[in-house]
Image (tube, rainbow, N blue to C red):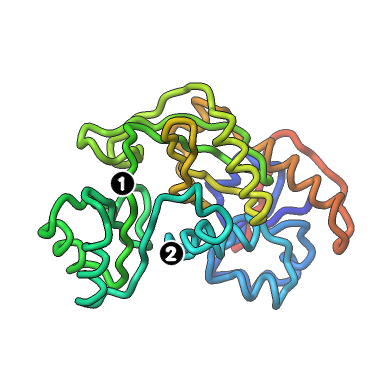
Amino acid sequence: MKLVSFDALRTLKFPAHTYLKPELFLQHQEEIKAADFVLFPEYWQLSSLLFGLHARIFPSLASYLIGHNKIEMTRVFQTVAPQHHPHTLIEANTAESAQRVFAHMPLPFVAKNPKASMGNGVFLIDNLSDWRRYCAQTDVLYAQEYLPIDRDLRLVVVGEKVVGGYWRLQSENGFHNNIAQGGTVLAGPIPEAARLLVENLAARLHIDHAGFDVAMVGDHPYLFEFNRLFGTQGIEALIGDITPHIIDYLRGQLDSFPGKPRSPSGNTGRRRVRRAA
């Protein structure tokens, strides 16, 4: 395969490919058009790559668009799997909306900054003072049902299939499960209900590279969110290198979709990366 990457670290273990700095992509249009896949472009590059150069990208466009922020994700989850998403209200931050949302949500509940990640911008609301502090630092109100859990699952999807997962135990602050916020990882069996939910959703939405966060309340799985560019802490130690899964998926995509002819597979051994200035 002819591969162009815009993320040197995430494609470090890939077969031979060309790395381009994202800000220089306009100087390498012919290489991009000749590539079988353009890997991990920046969000701001999408329109030019897809509609200007007709490039085939990985991750998929749906992975980028739906995963852009929590509001985008929540709206989709509420549409396709409302019974598997915690009850959530999203409103503009006005005095009237703030009062209405606080009156509606049972205490405690969770409030989030819609564009935050890695557990940042997530608050446990126990009282009106907590709510007012949250409202003072956000333009959009995002209030979500609090689930009685002390851990959640991170399920890694490649090519619309779960290729592995692990549990994240609650941090000492008694609230966050994110590793970046002090949570710890634990190997263990993945509930079948969680795996099926994530795979069905990924296939329906055409999400082909993501880390899904899922809570189990009894036997019932709840989707929190997914991260298109998920962290690697815990992943290789618990589920191994996911690079072979990505390569297999990309090869399958070339076989399945018309368009650019499939390139010879080439050397799949030691990585040789040509960096273009």
* Distance CA(mark 1)–CA(mark 2): 17 Å
Percent position of residue 47, x then y:
62, 74
Relative height, residue 23 to residue 152 (above, below): below
Q: What label does residue 24 carry, if any?
A: none
Relative height, residue 80 to residue 135 (above, below): above
Task: Say what amino acid the circle numbered 2 marks.
Answer: Ile
Task: Look at mark 2 in the image and give the residue it sits on.
Answer: 71
Are the residues tagged 1 and 2 within 8 Å (C-beta)? no
User: Mark 1 or mark 2: which comes first in sequence?
Assistant: 2
Tag 1, which secondary structure? loop
Percent position of residue 126, x then y:
16, 50
Q: Nearest the camera: 142 or 158?
A: 142
Percent position of residue 244, x then y:
69, 35
Tag 2, which secondary structure? helix
Percent position of residue 10, x then y:
55, 46
Q: Nearest the camera: 55 or 9?
A: 55
The residue at the point 33 percent across, 41 percent down is: 180
- Between label 1 and label 2, give the one nearer the viewer: 1
